[in-house]
Image (spheres, rainbow, N blue to C red):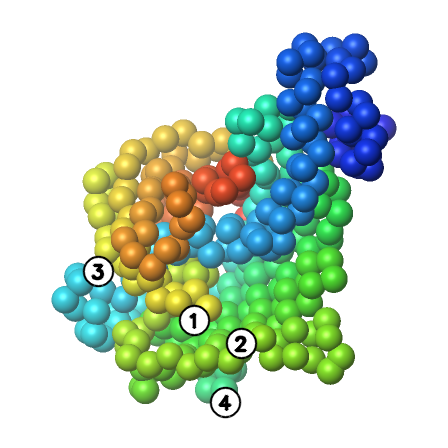
Amino acid sequence: MERGFVRVLKQPAEEIANARGHAGNTGIPYAFSDLFYRRARCLRSHVKGFAISSASFTVIAIVCIFTVGFAVNTAEDNKNAPPVKTDFSRFTGETLVYSVKWDPPWYMFFLPKMEAGELVFRFQGIDEFRGKPAVKIAVDAYSSGTLAKLADMKVEDEFLFYSTPETLCAEGSVSKIREGKRRRLLELEYFQDERRLHFRVTDEADTPHRILRDVTKTDLPPCIRDPFSTLYFYRTLNLTKGSEHNLIVGNDDRVLDVRTRVENQEAVTTMAGKFTAWRIRTDALRGGLFSQDGDFRIWVSADERKLPVRFEIKVRLGHVLGELKSVEENL
């Protein structure tokens, strides 16, 4: 049986309007019932807009989560320095699964936290991109639970990221966006030697397919890491309380500056177990990584694995919350 607020949100607008003021069946005081129905009347469109604009949690959770560790060289005047080579082979075969929830804003007090979906990413090791060896990271995002019902939209997004094996500098990515009727193909290529990128967005819902964006940008830093190669690069760094990094972040055709700060160690309990973890906060210095009043925190286990175990993102409509659900490692 669906909970009361789900039934209300599925009612036609005129039924919701007719129900205004009838607090007897809801157990909500009259003053609050009027607000409840006015909020419920428009909530479906807000939730659907939230789901689409954030790729039903994928854009927010993917772009924001792991830009935390996006660095070439943290010194502002050394952005053109060559990237440090590191052995990332220990991550090969690792699969991380996250449960993602949506926490509505305070004025939607009648809604509880609700399941939004699941994120799965795999460090698949060496593959090939543009005819040369590249590390391949695969990411899948699925909608599920109450938020998917409210938005009335199914999400099955697939992302493939390719990067240089020794440095995890981005070589390119291919993203298939499948969100309800929305079907997009995002193709990104980096040309490190030429310090340029090419980004193209194709609408595959149209017949024939339609190019929505086709841009080239130049004068880039010599090494740009995508959000997920960033995750693994960050896990090789030494984390101590109070340490800060000014970082270079890349997403689609944007290059952004982000500052991270390691705050404190905290006990974190997730579906994958209990962890002692560093709480890390990020701020966008310029480039608009976050919307107004946006905020992002991530918890990374304080051990050799440095597993991202929890994240919290403030967004236009409340917060997106995620926790580690399971870990599969290549033993």
Q: Which residue is mark 3?
A: 74
- Of labels 2 and 3, earlier in sequence is 3
Q: For label 4, count other residues whose C-alpha is less than 10 Å away and answer few (under 14), some (14-19) or many (20+).
A: few
Label 1 vs label 4: CA separation? 23 Å
- Left or right: where 52 falls relative to 21: left
Q: Residue at x 50, y 89 (%)?
A: 131
Circles 2 and 1, Cβ within 8 Å, touching? The answer is yes
Q: Residue at x 64, y 22 (%)?
A: 35
Rendered position, 67 above or below 214 = above
Q: Nearer the viewer, mark 2 or mark 4?
A: 2
Return the residue nearer the eye: 78 or 277. 78
Rendered position, 233 above or below 61 = below
- Secondary structure beneath dot 3 equals loop
Q: Which residue is mark 4?
A: 131
Q: Nearer the viewer, mark 2 or mark 1?
A: 2
Rendered position, 92 above or below 148 = below
Q: Nearer the viewer, mark 1 or mark 3?
A: 1
- Left or right: where 302 falls relative to 145: left
Q: Which residue is mark 1?
A: 253
Residue type beneath disc 2: Arg
**In x, y percent, where is residue 60?**
51, 51
- Secondary structure beneath dot 2 equals strand
Label 2 vs label 3: CA separation? 31 Å
Return the residue nearer the eye: 170 or 36. 36
- Of labels 1 and 3, earlier in sequence is 3
Return the mark for residue 161. none
Q: Which residue is mark 2?
A: 213
Residue type beneath disc 3: Thr
Circles 2 and 3, Cβ within 8 Å, touching? The answer is no
